[in-house]
């Protein structure tokens, strides 16, 4: 009986040893660094209400407004969807190369704590303004990758990413700088201070009233015809801001589209800077529909009303802003008839 008890005790000891060994193996496997894994594996962009990116003296704050984000530092002007999507794409593509270590000395050496000139910080918050992510990016590794640390996690180690992490805090990167973009085939007429460019029966835009001995200058005509194609700004100001309040605007170019809607631009100068205001116009604001109106005509009238609503929304938004434009853009809106012609060859 004693011998049997001894065998049982021995078996129990062996089982305990095997259990401890298995636990240690599982525990070590769980703690082992998984090279190539993604830093963010369960982040839901739809839950992100606020994004703050900072580097040195630069900070940009993006806040969700409906289906888009706006730039808080630019008085709530819309952010570019592509830029926000690119930011999330960058986050989801961060893979980890190795765990570097921890501690204040190492964090300081890698520009993680305290933040230095090389440090970029990213904070994502939910609707309750609770931090979802607090990521700090430090120095770039010579062989590629970047040192980083998640400050929203307790005792998070310092990690090295598999490649660079292109996140910047320049607000111009995120601003929706395109005011308007008109496709040239949609243009009926472009009117300047002393000229008219109109579409012919073939759809081609030509300068009207060219005197004898003159012909169109292709380069200048290209600038005039493309003035409303991808119209972008350099800086933005509220219409009642001190820097633009006393500006005197004059009419520049006006474009009328084949659907009857149009856009007019006014310019003002202050020193070397050129500022722009823009407004739209609709052919009709209401239409009459009879009981026997054909379906095709109903669709045409519905399209007219849709465009009228678009123009109304355009004016409601852009009426609040004055845009500083580059000299390259300004040149297109300052053309005169003489600039659009050259001597016949």
Image (spheres, rainbow, N blue to C red):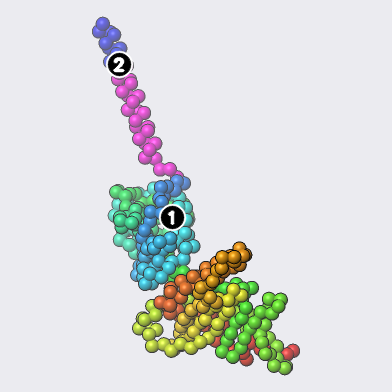
Residue at image coords 37%, 32%: 25
The residue drawn where x is 28% and y is 8% is 3
Residue linked to disc 2: 10
Q: Is residue 158 above or below residue 187?
A: above
State the SS at label 1.
Answer: helix
Image quarter (top left, top right, bottom left or bottom right) of the C terminus: bottom right
> On screen, 1 above or below 51?
above
Mark nearer the N terminus (2 vs 1): 2
Q: Which residues are magenta?
A: 10-35
Question: Is 147 rendered above or below residue 264?
Answer: above
**Quadrant of the image containing the N terminus:** top left
Which residue is the extreme one toward the front? 291
Q: Where is residue 88 shown, x and y percent of the image?
A: 44, 57
Q: Is residue 283 visible?
A: yes
Circle 1 crowding by C-alpha within 10 Å: few under 14, some 14–19, many from 20: some
Residues at marks 2 and 1, CA–CA distance in whole angstroms: 54 Å
The one nearer the camera, 238 or 103, is: 238
Q: Nearer the viewer, residue 86 or 26?
A: 86
Q: Which residue is mark 1?
A: 91
Q: Name the outermost residue toward the top.
A: 1
Q: Residue at horizontal 43%, vertical 60%?
A: 67
State the residue at coordinates (53%, 72%): 287
Q: Main secondary structure of the magenta part?
A: helix
Whole-percent x and y of residue 38?
Answer: 44, 48
């Amino acid at each position: 009986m004693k011998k049997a008890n001894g065998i049982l005790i021995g078996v129990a000891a062996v089982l305990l040893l095997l259990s401890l060994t298995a636990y240690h193996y599982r525990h070590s496997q769980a703690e082992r660094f998984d090279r190539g894994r993604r830093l963010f594996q369960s982040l839901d962009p739809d839950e992100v209400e606020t994004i703050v990116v900072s580097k040195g003296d630069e900070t940009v704050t993006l806040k969700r407004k409906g289906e888009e984000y706006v730039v808080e530092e630019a008085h709530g002007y819309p952010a570019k969807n592509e830029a926000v999507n690119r930011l999330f794409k960058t986050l989801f593509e961060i893979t980890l190369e190795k765990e570097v270590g921890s501690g204040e000395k190492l964090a300081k050496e890698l520009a993680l704590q305290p933040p230095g000139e090389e440090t970029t910080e990213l904070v994502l918050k939910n609707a309750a303004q609770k931090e979802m992510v607090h990521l700090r990016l430090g120095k770039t590794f010579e062989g590629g990758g970047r040192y980083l640390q998640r400050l929203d996690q307790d005792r998070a180690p310092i990690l090295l990413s598999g490649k660079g992490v292109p996140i910047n805090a320049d607000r111009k990167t995120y601003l929706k700088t395109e005011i308007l973009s008109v496709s040239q085939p949609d243009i009926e007429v472009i009117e300047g201070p002393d000229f008219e460019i109109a579409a012919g029966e073939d759809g081609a835009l030509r300068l009207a009233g060219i005197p004898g001995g003159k012909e169109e200058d292709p380069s200048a005509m290209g600038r005039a015809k493309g003035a409303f194609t991808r119209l972008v700004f350099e800086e933005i100001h509220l219409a009642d801001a001190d820097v633009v309040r006393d500006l005197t605007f004059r009419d520049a170019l006006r474009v009328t589209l084949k659907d009857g809607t149009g856009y007019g631009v006014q310019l003002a100068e202050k020193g070397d800077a050129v500022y722009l205001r823009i407004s739209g116009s609709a052919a009709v604001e209401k239409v009459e529909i009879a009981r026997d109106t054909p379906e095709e005509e109903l669709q045409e009238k519905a399209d007219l009303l849709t465009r009228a609503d678009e123009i109304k929304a355009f004016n409601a938004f852009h009426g609040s802003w004055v845009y500083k434009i580059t000299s390259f853009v300004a040149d297109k809106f300052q053309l005169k008839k003489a600039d659009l012609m050259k001597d016949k060859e």
